[in-house]
Image (cartoon, rainbow, N blue to C red):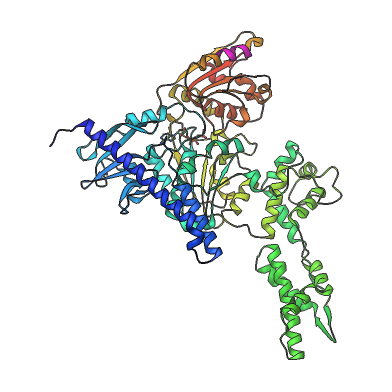
């Protein structure tokens, strides 16, 4: 075997990187050129516009970010070398220079092992500093060498200080994550993962993978990412574009159902009732009770003719349409067109002529027909149905106290002037779903799903009825009053009761000492979830007791000053009520209310008075568990009040 020349090997790899970058630039140049000449080559305006849009997207997809490596790995299979990167790069002859990480062959980069080498002789990982290729690490699977999570490059990647928004993890996706990322489009899955196990990362990479594999189909139907709030969505917003995917919709549940602005806040009791799944029945029953049996015939004068439909056939039409189980508005339209069809038949019989479109339209609108429709199958809007229920909550499904809790103290004069709450908008969305079908996305990823109320989950179910879904969450991090204690019920509300629940337990964010502290809260959280095991041995944990409560904020500032001597982001997380008085004038430091940190992470987290965070809300211990698990490298806990009992041992 020839001696292995490390320097020569490294410079060959650098050369391949330079060549690949140049090839990508040429691909982009060609796309730009096509984009600018598109309107001249395309036959008509429509095709030109289609082509223009396609090319604009293609140009965007081919953008090269010089700070992210174009490839991060290499597979040697049957004496050929395949570089694996963020997207396909081909040379001028169309030969691959870099394989997209999502291509079938790339799968082995993530999954090959000594036990199952998948034809891979050597797996190489590259180390980069600011886009410069600086090192590599080989695993000769054919010689029984395997690094697994001991890879130096993986460790460096995980321990890299965090700044700014979330990054992609394509270079270091782990086998158990890859299995979820590459699951079939038809598979709905629920990932129960401890904090920092990569749920969000898996969900985003799964979206990118599915778009690659089912490009045309998913471009038509769309992919939707649902997150808990806009801060979270902007934190993750850069990941998919970095992977070349620029057309994924991201929204909070509030945005999905936001037909009207939120103009009022409900009492906690009303919020609970409105988010209860029984409201779905209340809405459906109230709606369908509006149908009445026709008792009068319809009589229509049409020039010198008079047409008549008796009550009996009208009853049949209504009953039949009801039995077809269509959305309310569709059913109503069907009744209307069947009534008109009966009139048409009479007209044809009497006149011997077939009436035209205009006549049919006119007959649909004549007073006897609309009067019949209004009585038998009245027109309803989603907001009018909800307004009706809030004005006078129907008996039967809710207790009297529950009905009192949601009843409007002063009903608005008109539905238009009604002030709706956030929960009302979910009800209006449910009502809209009874009236008409929602269009369904091809795939929906729902993050922090443990906090979905049944009614919110149903809003998502309507948008994924014909597609699949990836549900991500951690029961231990549930803080909503309706937070799930097990996944089955939520999956039922999401319309995917058969989705497999898959655990992730290897933590990539939180250092072992911090995980150990947070895990002590787990037995008190009332949920049965596997504990996280941290891959990180490097972190620091400091508990700072303060004897005089008036020194608490000053002690917090001292911790901030100490934290600033390190690289990376710093956050002070405090009970929402304390945030305003904690003013810290430094661009590297954020003061964040405990209620807003879900899904986020910071290099150094300083927790300000845990007891206040716990006392601020009914699920305060779950909230504290979320807060303690935001730290990437260091956690300081500053307290004047006693720590919650399970944490005392650490003090
Ligand atoms: N395979 C991996 N390689 C490198 N980093 C990873 C990997 N998996 C996850 N990470 C990193 O670990 C951190 C936590 O990931 P992520 O936010 O997806 O976890 P999560 O399970 O959604 O956490 P939480 O429950 O707190 O919301 C992120 O910085 C992510 O980039």
Image coordinates of residue 183 in percent, x first then y, are: 42, 49
Image coordinates of residue 577 in percent, x first then y, are: 69, 24
- Residue sitting at x 46%, y 34%: 530
Q: Main secondary structure of the magenta part?
A: helix
Q: Is residue 559 above or below residue 420?
A: above
- Residue sitting at x 35%, y 46%: 23
Splitting the image into 4 quarters, where does residue 648 fall?
Answer: top right
Left or right of 178: which side holds 521? right
Q: How many labels does the image show?
A: 0
Residue at the far left in the pictured view? 1
Magenta segment: does it hold 391?
Answer: no
Q: In this view, does 104 lie above or below 310?
A: above
Q: Is there any visible trace of residue 602 in the rendered image?
A: yes
* Along the line of sight, the residue nearer the viewer: 309 or 203: 203
* Along the line of sight, the residue nearer the viewer: 152 or 11: 11
Q: Is there any visible trace of residue 229 in the rendered image?
A: no
Q: In this view, does 613 lie above or below 439?
A: above
- Residue sitting at x 65%, y 11%: 549
Q: Is residue 127 above or below residue 563?
A: below
Residue at the far top in the pictured view? 547
* Along the line of sight, the residue nearer the viewer: 512 or 347: 347
Image coordinates of residue 145 in percent, x first then y, are: 24, 35
Magenta span of residues: 553-559
Image coordinates of residue 641 in percent, x first then y, are: 63, 15
Left or right of 512: which side holds 437? right
Left or right of 61: which side holds 109? left
Splitting the image into 4 quarters, where does residue 136 fall?
Answer: top left
Left or right of 549: which side holds 14? left
């Amino acid at each position: 075997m020839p001696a292995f020349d490390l320097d020569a090997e490294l410079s060959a790899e650098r050369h391949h990187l330079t060549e690949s970058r140049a090839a990508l630039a040429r691909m982009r140049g060609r796309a730009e050129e096509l984009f600018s000449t598109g309107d001249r080559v395309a036959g008509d305006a429509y095709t030109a516009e289609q082509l223009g849009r396609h090319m604009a997207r293609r140009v965007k997809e081919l953008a090269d970010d010089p700070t992210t490596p174009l490839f991060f790995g290499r597979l040697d299979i049957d004496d050929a070398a395949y570089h694996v990167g963020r997207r396909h790069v081909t040379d001028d002859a169309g030969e691959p220079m870099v394989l997209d990480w999502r291509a079938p062959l790339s799968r082995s980069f993530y999954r090959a092992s000594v036990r199952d080498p998948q034809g891979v002789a050597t797996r190489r990982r590259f180390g980069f500093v600011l886009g410069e290729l600086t090192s590599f690490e080989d695993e000769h699977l054919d010689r029984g060498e395997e690094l697994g999570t001991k890879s130096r490059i993986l460790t460096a990647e995980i321990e890299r200080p965090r700044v700014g928004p979330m990054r992609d993890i394509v270079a270091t996706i782990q086998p158990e994550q890859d299995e979820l990322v590459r699951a079939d489009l038809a598979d709905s899955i629920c990932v129960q993962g401890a904090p920092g196990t990569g749920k969000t990362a898996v969900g985003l990479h799964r979206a990118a993978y599915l778009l690659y594999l089912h490009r045309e189909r998913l471009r038509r139907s769309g992919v939707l990412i649902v997150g808990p709030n806009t801060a979270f969505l902007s934190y993750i917003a850069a990941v998919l574009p970095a992977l070349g995917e620029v057309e994924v919709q991201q929204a909070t549940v509030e945005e999905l159902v936001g037909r009207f602005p939120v103009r009022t806040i409900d009492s906690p009791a009303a919020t609970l009732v409105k988010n209860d799944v029984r409201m779905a029945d209340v809405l459906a029953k109230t709606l369908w009770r509006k149908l009445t049996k026709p008792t009068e015939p319809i009589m229509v004068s049409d020039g010198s003719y008079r047409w008549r439909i008796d009550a009996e056939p009208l009853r049949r039409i209504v009953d039949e349409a009801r039995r077809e189980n269509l959305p309310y508005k569709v059913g109503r339209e069907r009744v209307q067109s069947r009534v008109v069809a009966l009139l048409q038949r009479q007209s044809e019989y009497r006149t011997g002529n077939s009436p035209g479109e205009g006549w049919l339209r006119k007959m649909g609108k004549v007073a006897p027909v609309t009067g019949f429709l209004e009585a038998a199958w009245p027109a309803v809007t989603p907001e009018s149905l909800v307004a009706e229920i809030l004005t006078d909550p129907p008996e039967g499904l809710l207790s009297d106290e529950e009905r009192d809790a949601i009843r409007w103290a002063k009903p608005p004069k008109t539905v238009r002037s009604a002030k709706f709450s956030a929960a009302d908008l979910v009800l209006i969305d449910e009502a809209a779903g009874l009236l008409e079908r929602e269009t369904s996305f091809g795939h929906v990823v729902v993050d922090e799903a443990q906090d979905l109320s049944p009614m919110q989950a149903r809003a998502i179910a309507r948008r994924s009825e014909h597609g699949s879904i990836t549900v991500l969450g951690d029961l231990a991090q549930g803080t909503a009053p309706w937070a799930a204690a097990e996944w089955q019920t939520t999956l039922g509300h999401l319309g995917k009761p058969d989705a497999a629940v898959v655990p992730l337990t290897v933590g990539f964010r939180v250092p072992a000492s911090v995980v150990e502290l947070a895990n002590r809260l787990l037995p008190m959280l009332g949920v049965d979830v596997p504990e996280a095991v941290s891959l990180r041995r490097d972190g620091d944990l400091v508990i700072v007791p303060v004897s005089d409560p008036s020194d608490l904020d000053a002690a917090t500032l001292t911790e901030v000053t100490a934290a600033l001597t390190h690289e990376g982001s710093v956050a002070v997380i405090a009970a929402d009520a304390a945030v305003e008085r904690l003013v810290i004038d430094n661009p590297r430091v954020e003061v964040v209310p405990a209620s807003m940190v879900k899904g986020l992470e910071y290099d150094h987290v300083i927790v300000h008075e845990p007891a206040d965070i716990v006392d601020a809300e009914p699920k305060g211990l779950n909230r504290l568990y979320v807060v303690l698990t935001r730290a990437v490298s260091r956690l300081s806990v500053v307290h004047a009040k006693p720590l919650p009992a399970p944490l005392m041992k650490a003090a």
